[in-house]
Amino acid sequence: MEWPKELLELFDDPLLDGVRPKVAAPTADDRMSSKLAEVTAWIEQHGREPQMTGDLKEKMMCAAMIGLRKKNLM
């Protein structure tokens, strides 16, 4: 399909510089999937499940893991 020249010229307008479509906000499923991948990577890196007795990052991973388990994802 050939675009009309007038339409193509609109895209070259300096007023439209930096105009981008809105990025869709992540869904709850997207956030859970991301957190699951993060916890899994932590477990693979450390060879064990995170514990609440570790440093702040480990405590955050443990809390996320507990939350995921409550949702039956782990």
Image (cartoon, rainbow, N blue to C red):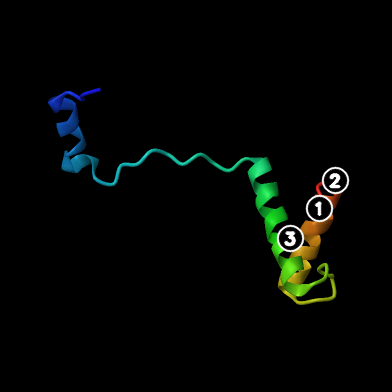
Q: Tell me the mark number nearer the camera, choosing from 3 and 1.
A: 3
| Residue 73 relative to residue 24: left or right | right
In terms of sequence position, does the residue under pointer 3 or pointer 2 come before the other?
A: 3
Disc 1 designates what residue?
A: 67
Indicate the position of residue 31 as horizontal and vertical percent values.
65, 48
Disc 3 designates what residue?
A: 40
Q: Are there few (<14), some (14-19), or many (20+) residues within 10 Å of tag 3?
A: some
Disc 2 designates what residue?
A: 72
In terms of sequence position, does the residue under pointer 3 or pointer 1 come before the other?
A: 3
> Disc 1 marks which amino acid?
Gly
Instruction: Label 2, secondary structure: give it.
Output: loop
Cα separation between marks 3 and 2: 15 Å
Q: Residue at x 77, y 58 (%)?
A: 64
Indicate the position of residue 25 as horizontal and vertical percent values.
54, 41
> Disc 3 marks which amino acid?
Thr
| Residue 32 relative to residue 10: left or right | right
Indicate the position of residue 37 as horizontal and vertical percent values.
69, 56
Q: Which quadrant of the view contains residue 1?
A: top left
